[in-house]
Amino acid sequence: MSGETNSYEIVRRDPRAEWIARNRLHPLHGTISVGEEAEVRGPSGLIRKNPHKVGFIGPNGIKRIDRLKGNAAAAATGRRSGGAAQEVQLPLHKVENPDFSIFVVPDMVGGRLTSQDKDILGQAHKLARSDDGESAVQGVVVAVVFGELKDDSLDTAGVDRLIHLDGEEYQGYCPEQQLTALVHLDATYNPQNWLFPDSVHGGTDLGSRLAARLGERPAVQAWQVDKKTTVCRGASGSTDISRPTPRILLLAEECADPIDETRHEVQPIELGSVPRVISRMQDMGQVSVDPNAIPLAEAEFILSAGNGIHNWDQFHEAAEALGATEGASRVAVDDGFMPRFRQVGATGTWVTARVYIAVGISGAIQHMQGIGQCDKVIAINTDAGCDMVKRAALSAIGDSEEILAELLKLAREHKAGQSEGGDQNAA
Amino acid sequence: MPLNIVSLVSVGRHPQSGRERRAEQDGRAVELGMNLEASQSASMTVLHAGRSVEPVLRNYAGMGLPSLEVLELSEQDDAVPSLAQYLKASDADIVLTGVRAESGESSGMVPYLLAEELGWPLVPRIADIVSINNGVAEILLALPRGQRRSLSVPLPFVASVDNAAPAPRQSAYGPGMRASIDASQVTAVTDSAREQWQEAPAKPRPKRLKVVKAKTAADRFKAATAKPQGKAGKVMKNESAQEQAQEIFNLLLEEKVIK
Ligand SMILES: Cc1cc2nc3c(=O)[nH]c(=O)nc-3n(C[C@H](O)[C@H](O)[C@H](O)COP(=O)(O)OP(=O)(O)OC[C@H]3O[C@@H](n4cnc5c(N)ncnc54)[C@H](O)[C@@H]3O)c2cc1C
């Protein structure tokens, strides 16, 4: 193609320059240009690749083509450090002077973001982004957290600003006080939207309270939200209602993708005083329910027995003392020690417990499938190499009977101490 | 003074057939009210805002109600103003509703709006009313994972009844047909905001795919084939059984599963 122009000039090679270009360690290497890029636009606009210009000359003079697109370094170091996943520092998303704000009130079950909370933070960023290209307005995502906060992943979940209300008036069950705080925030910051998870953990309740107080009509079970329209489920999930996006949104699960490519500032916002209300509803604490009456799939705390249990009376005692729902592996069920409906795993129940104690369970894949959603697994096993120990957050290697006996003792001491303390308080 | 209980009922929707039915939670609210009626010598009114010719109302009446009150409204009307007006005029002590209606917008806002309008406390998702003494009710709230919380609330209040409440009794056809349905005319307020909305049968929502955001083929391959490796937790091998048990117990306390 360019042969015509080239035929007029005689191509002269400069071996020394070529040698310098090849030798990256040569002091003059930087001054000698390596030539045009490998990809140029041809006269017709198509991209032309010059195969001679692709790649680089390796240290021993052999041409290398990097097909890892610049990730070779990461891959190489990854292998050298024994396959340990490299911690990547995500780019920091900064909001200096926000034009508006989106307030999110996550559930924070047990002080941690739930997966629904993360989805809703993702949704908040979708609303905060100025993707319609009209003007460069930018929103800030503010999370309002009540009570304890244990999560350390707020930055990667997408919290730009954090309002943490942690006074003693926010301990326990206090929707009226929380509502007062939200109304106060609404008056102070006038956020563009309020986002709540539509969940049984309190998000629905608080969102509905705020909507009723502010006289806004919320969208509930919203699952497709943009700046203009919202699609939400109505009639117990059998219809889709499309409507203009309201100020208060109660969002369904998986309404948007969670944030995963940026880090956020998590700048705390200090609030002045929030008015306190005298709650009409008086919290008298959680009532102890018979843990074995709770369906296994819903139970929060499960003590599960496998083939490594030899003293079954002790196991039942321990479950009762700890207040745990009983579970079992298939072997324990097949051997007749536990009823079939207690079986955890692929052919049993898929449990969602927050804390799962596996006593004498080896961790067969069929069993592991059933505990995939569990947060904290604790293993008690004689075999330090078994799969359950690999999965567990905490493993105790030893005989199940001894450890359960000690646990039983601790649980009883704890209970005794508590009832004494209770008596003292009452006195 | 006997207690006055008002149970609000709506038209339910069978999840499979889509046919009209007695709504699950509203049925439970009526059941709860009838139990209180028996134990507390209370009197209960069952109230529906809507069309009085609704056949489903006979299903509620068939639970053993002598009569039902209906505020005559058409489908486009907003039920909350009429209900609030009725409740303000009545001397109700407890208003029971379901958590969410099974038809219409299903927003679950009715109890909240009524409580706001009346200035009463709202108790969400109750499982039972344990006792009522000296104008204070002791209530069990239904929490997720089968847990319960105990609350004491002064009368009057609005409460929404969760599915964890006792199941409603069977409805008998004959008594249901014999019950009287007392309709009263009210000034209707049309729900004008809703007229602008579009409603369509629910589209199935796309399942979320597990997208692996890997930049290279090697990473994608690893994500597809590698066993999910949990972060190795703490392993206690050489400690005594007592130390191990203490550590486990501390974790349980920290996670707040032991109270
Ligand atoms: C189609 C199919 C479906 C299945 N579905 C399920 C299912 O749904 N759920 C399920 O659980 N299984 C299921 N299984 C069975 C599964 O493959 C395993 O056989 C089973 O989970 C093993 O149970 P286990 O861990 O209790 O017993 P084992 O594998 O025998 O493990 C016992 C463990 O206890 C330890 N141990 C022994 N003595 C002590 C001691 N004194 N103190 C402490 N630890 C001790 C051992 O080190 C060992 O790790 C299924 C299998 C098949 C083929």
Image: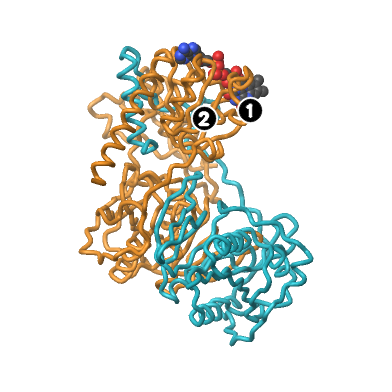
Chain colours: A orange, B cyan
Q: Is residue B185 above or below residue A59?
A: below
Q: Is mark 1 within 8 Å of ligand 1?
A: no
Residue annotated with mark 2: A326
Which residue matches tag 1?
A340
Task: Estimate the x, y position of residue A229 in percent, counting from the top left.
Answer: 53, 67
Figure check: A90 above or below A413 = below
Tell me which corner region of the image, top left, top right, bottom left or bottom right, holds residue A189.
bottom left
Residues flagged by tags 1 and 2 on a common chain: yes
> Dot 2: what SS?
strand
Q: How many marks?
A: 2
Asked if one can make out residue B198 in the rendered structure from this viewpoint, the answer is yes
Residue B74 relative to residue A227: left or right? right
State which quadrant residue A320 falls in.
top left
Q: Is residue A15 above or below residue A153?
A: above
Residue at image coords 63%, 27%: A340
Residue A221 at what x, y percent from top left? 54, 59
Seen from the viewer's position, the closer of residues A194 and B92 is: B92
> Which is more toward the observer, A249 or B245?
B245
| Residue occupying the point 72% across, 60% down | B171
Quarter of the N terminus of chain A within the rendering: top right
Q: Chain of mark 1?
A: A
Q: Chain of mark 2?
A: A
Indicate the amino acid at tag 2: Glu
- Which element is circle 1 on? helix
Q: What percent of the width, then of the height, locates residue B155? A: 42, 68
| Observer-nearest of B29 and B116 | B29
* Mark linked to residue B98: none
Amino acid on which disc 1 is placed: Arg
Q: Nearer the viewer, residue A3 or A88?
A: A88
Image quadrant of ligand 1?
A: top right
